[in-house]
Image: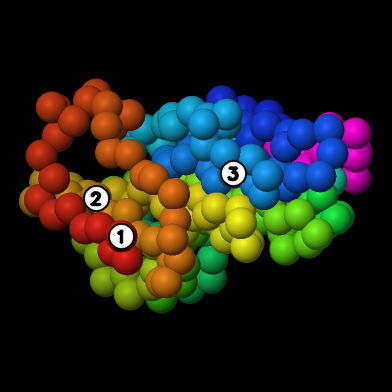
């Protein structure tokens, strides 16, 4: 599915104000950040989607200024679903990243990462799977980074040495970063699973929640490994 347009989707970022502020970013697996001259008390986004069966689009970021049409928010990432009975050899990239906001003095905020949902018998290669949140902009007024999206990969055999990442987008100066996304992997041959959320190194990202957005609810799944990296 295609990207979600700026300012649209269940976790859409809101436009900052009528004058002199940066845009608020979109959510998905975590909260989107809020822009300069904004605060978390007057800006809330919705966390949504499934950890184990992610199929949702990312959401679009908010504009920096209601009256400035050029300060648009970034589009959210798309939804990628791959179902193979054979081998997926990934030496390139599968990306469902949110876009950065518009580059004006009162800039738009990032769109959130989308979803990547892969089922395959064998996974191999050294490529990359990403669902990063879009970054804000560093201008006269700074805009916020968006939440990362969701990645889930099921396999029976794996020699994959590549990466799976869903960072929150960068916010600048007084704007905040987006929360990290979720990365779920399951080895169907022995029924073991790992859930990971990973922030970009050194970045003070916003919150990521692990709650009943998990497909069927947390009570229905036992994770063999839970990793929180750079949290």
Bin the neighbour count of mark 3 within 10 Å (Cα to Cα): few under 14, some 14-19, many 20 and up.
many
Q: Which residue is mark 2?
A: 195
Q: Which mark is residue 119?
A: none
* Separation of marks 3 and 1 at Cα, in angstroms: 19 Å
Q: Is residue 51 left or right of residue 18?
A: left
Is residue 163 one of those drawn in magenta?
Answer: no
> In front here: 25 or 133?
25
Q: Position of residue 26 (x, y in %)?
A: 59, 39
Q: Which residue is mark 1?
A: 231
Is residue 68 one of those drawn in magenta?
Answer: yes
Bin the neighbour count of mark 1 within 10 Å (Cα to Cα): few under 14, some 14-19, many 20 and up.
some
**Residue at 43%, 42% in the rendered image:** 30
Span highlighted in magenta in the image: 62-70
Bin the neighbour count of mark 2 within 10 Å (Cα to Cα): few under 14, some 14-19, many 20 and up.
many
- Sequence order check: which comes first, mark 3 or mark 2? 3
The reply to whether residue 113 is in sight is no
């Amino acid at each position: 599915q295609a990207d979600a347009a700026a300012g649209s989707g269940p976790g859409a970022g809101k436009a900052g104000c009528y004058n002199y502020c940066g845009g608020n970013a979109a959510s998905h697996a975590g909260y989107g950040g809020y822009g300069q001259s904004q605060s978390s008390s007057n800006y809330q986004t919705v966390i949504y989607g499934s950890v184990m069966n992610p199929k949702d689009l990312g959401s679009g970021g908010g504009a920096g200024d209601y009256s400035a049409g050029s300060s648009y928010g970034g589009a959210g990432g798309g939804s990628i679903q791959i179902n193979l009975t054979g081998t997926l050899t990934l030496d390139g990239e599968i990306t469902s990243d949110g876009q950065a906001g518009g580059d004006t003095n009162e800039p738009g905020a990032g769109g959130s990462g989308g979803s990547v949902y892969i089922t395959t018998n064998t996974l191999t290669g050294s490529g990359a799977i990403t669902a990063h949140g879009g970054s804000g902009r560093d201008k006269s007024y700074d805009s916020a980074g968006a939440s990362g999206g969701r990645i889930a990969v099921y396999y029976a055999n794996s020699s994959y040495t590549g990466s799976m990442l869903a960072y929150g987008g960068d916010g600048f100066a007084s704007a905040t970063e987006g929360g990290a996304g979720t990365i779920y992997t399951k080895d169907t041959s022995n029924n073991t699973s790992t859930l990971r959320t990973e922030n970009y190194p050194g970045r003070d990202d916003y919150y990521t929640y692990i709650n009943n957005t998990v497909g069927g609810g947390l009570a229905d799944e036992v994770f063999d490994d839970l990793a929180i990296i750079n949290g």
